[in-house]
Amino acid sequence: MKTIKFIPVLLLVAVVSSCSTVRVTSDYDTNATFGSYSTFAYFKPGIDKAEISDLDKKRILRAIDDELTAKGLQKSDNPDLFISFFTKSKERVDVYQSHYGWGGYWGWGWGYPWGYNSVSKTTEGTLYIDIIDAKRNELIWQGVGTAPLIKGNVDKKEERIRLIVQEILKKFPPQ
């Protein structure tokens, strides 16, 4: 009986922990020579179009600065690379149903079934980071990260943005 009561708790823990991860993909130009790039600058017209607050833009820019600098790239007025980003968001609705009980024969049961229904809504944000060869003016790498957004708590929001940027740029440069 204790096992039956414990199952909903396990499901809830699995759902909450799965929401905290960042899903990341990336794509790149296989003809680009990533080892030859050493400097970067931001592509302001692209960043200005991002539909987020100026404070969040600053958070993203600081996180990108930190990650690219840690990889040995330097900011420059005459860059090898332009960095741009844009964002999207959507409402995600998850419905969980659990029904369990005794016995049954081809889907027909008897006894007292227990179960629960749960609906959760989260806003999921997607950050696209574009890296452009400045001399050829061509996109050479794009990283995409998707994760639930945090509202309200500034420290947690900052931490979440840093994590998303860090996870995306782990894949840059491609190996």
Image (tube, rainbow, N blue to C red):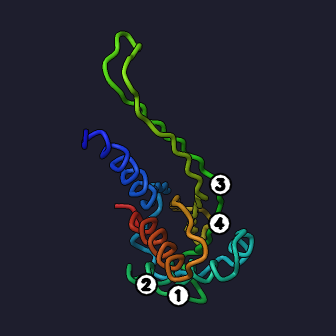
Locate residue 123, reporting x and y percent.
Answer: 61, 59
Q: Nearer the viewer, mark 4 or mark 1?
A: 4
Q: Which residue is mark 4?
A: 86
Between the residue at mark 4 and the residue at mark 1, the CA separation in whole angstroms equals 20 Å
| Left or right for 3, reference 92 | left
Query: Hey, what amino acid is under mark 3?
Result: Lys
**Going 38% across and 82% down the picture, which residue do you hit?**
70
82, 21: nearer the viewer? 21
**Where residue 141 appears, x then y in whole percent?**
51, 62
Q: Which residue is mark 3?
A: 90
Residue under pointer 2: 69
Q: Secondary structure at mark 3?
A: strand
* Quarter residue 149 falls in: bottom right
Q: Position of residue 16 (x, y in %)?
A: 42, 56
The residue nearer to you, when weighing 88 against 148, is 148
CA separation, marks 4 and 2? 21 Å
To which quarter of the image does residue 42 belong?
bottom right
36 shown above or below 1? below
Q: In the rendered structure, which disc, 1 or 2, sits on the residue that comes first in sequence? A: 2
Q: Could you say where residue 47 lies in the image, as x and y percent from the top left?
A: 68, 74
Q: Sequence-wise, which precedes: disc 4 or disc 1?
A: 1
Marks 3 and 2, Cα distance to the nearest angstrom?
Answer: 31 Å
Name the front one of labels 1 and 2. Answer: 2
Q: CA distance from mark 1 to mark 3?
A: 33 Å
Q: Check the picture and name the quadrant holding the C terminus.
A: bottom left
Structural distance between the alpha carbons of marks 3 and 4: 14 Å
Residue at mark 1: 75
User: Which numbered disc flags the more N-terminal residue, 4 or 2?
Assistant: 2
Crowd rating for badge 3 (residues with CA inside 10 Å; few <14, some 14–19, many 20+): few
Q: Is residue 150 above or below residue 70?
A: above
